[in-house]
Image (cartoon, rainbow, N blue to C red):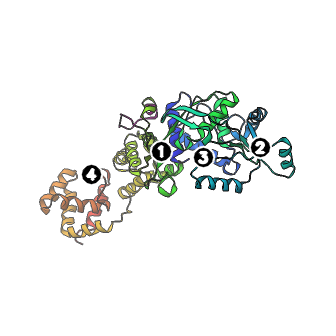
Amino acid sequence: MHLGNARTALFSALLGDRFLLRIEDTDAERSRSEFVSELLADLRWLGLLWDEGPLSAEPGPDYFQSWRGDVYRRYYEQLERDGLAYPCFCSASELEIARKVQLASGQPPRYGGKCAGLSAVEVATKRDQGLAPTLRFRVAKGETVAFEDGVRGAQKFASADIGDFIIRRADGSPAFFFCNAIDDSVMGVDLVLRGEDHLANTPRQLLLLQALGLPAPRYAHMSLILGDDGAPLSKRNGSRSISQLREQGYLPLAVLNMLARIGHHYDNESILPLTRLKAEFNIAHLGRSPSRFDPAHLNHWQEEAVRHSDPDGLRQWLWDETWAVVPQERSADFLELVRSNCLFPADADRWARILFTDELVLEPEVEAAVRQAGEGFFGTAADALRAAPDFDGFLAAVKTRTGTKGKQLFMPLRGAWTGRFDGPELARIHQIMDPYRLRKRLEEYAPG
């Protein structure tokens, strides 16, 4: 599941009274059980639990379209009996040539109706020749399909611009928007919230449902998510799947808050749990303009999610190998350090090894600053640490004896203790690290 699909699922869950999950797997080549398993796992990780839908990836007749062939067949037969659908034997090459001619003349590409008037004898002859037809829906001429879109307002489409469209492929499988419309209607869906790239499907689906005498849901089409280059979000311009974000260490609360604010405005700018996101969601706050995915925006919510995590949640989030090096008596202090200084479990693991093991590697610029402070500085600091175990007393002694202050005081100490210039306050480092390790790291740069 990628970010665009996840946002659609989230907004559907936030807006509706009941959230339906349906597996639209009529394309056998792209629909495998492992994909369904991953989809279910992603939704559960995000906390988007469906009110209706499959309990597992095991196919069944209720929520897997691949098992609902008999349902669709009944409606195909009804359309054919009523003269509202007909077999089409046009080849892909014929259709492509016609499409290019229409585009070249400035016309919208649509089917010209070549097979619309075939007699029963002509149809039988072509079948006897081994030709497998698609099934097209017959669109009445001179009509207007109008509906009120929940996001984009009043919409109108001329039937002449739609043309007769395929509802069943030559291999017998149903077209996506056919079974999608049928299932929405017979399953009692009253609101379909989806991306604006499906807007052109809506008049076709409304025509189908009207022809079959089936109730139609309301439709609302959201703007698309764009990448940093202004193109629709894809792997090429920054998109990541939900499983990739999970593996990187993003928290579900961070992903939910980020997605909820792409193309949708909340008056409350604080990080919100799913219940509050739902309570404060307003379809009127959905924008019509495309929104861009910004990794910095996601990292902001990740920082907020880490800060607001309870201790048990943080413990489970961190790696087992991290906890293997954290002393039991320092675990609570370490969690507070993580809460204020880490975005991902990998960050926490680095700090655990800096603070609780001898695995210290100084970055080149840090080592240069430490060397520049000189042996005398660190000799004095090591002596001060022996004499004054409390941090304030230690710092005051080093400041007085070396005559340093500000960066000239703090940066060499931070560099020698952690190998980095960023991170927790020096007082927190002094508090959490073993006194022997603190002194040993200072003495490494003191006179021999």
Kindly identify the residue that appears in the image at 40 percent across and 35 percent down.
272
Residue found farthest to the bottom: 448
Q: From the viewer's side, name the closer residue of 113 and 218.
A: 113
Residue 158 quadrant: top right
Say which amino acid is labelled 1. Answer: Gln
Give the mark nearest the N terminus, 4 or 3.
Answer: 3
Question: Callout 2: few (<14), some (14-19), or many (20+) C-alpha neighbours within 10 Å?
Answer: many
Residue 401 quadrant: bottom left
User: What separation in Å lies between label 4 and label 3 (alpha carbons)?
Assistant: 41 Å
Kindly identify the residue that appears in the image at 37 percent across and 46 percent down.
300
Closer to viewer: mark 3 or mark 2: 2
Say which amino acid is labelled 2. Answer: Pro
Give the mark nearest the N terminus, 1 or 2.
Answer: 2
Q: From the viewer's side, name the closer residue of 161 and 154.
A: 161
Find disc 3 in the rendering and name its residue: 38
Residue 87: assigned label: 2
User: Mark 4 and 1 residues: CB-CB less than 8 Å, in contact?
Assistant: no
Find disc 1 in the rendering and name its residue: 316
Say which amino acid is labelled 3. Answer: Glu
Q: Secondary structure at mark 2?
A: strand
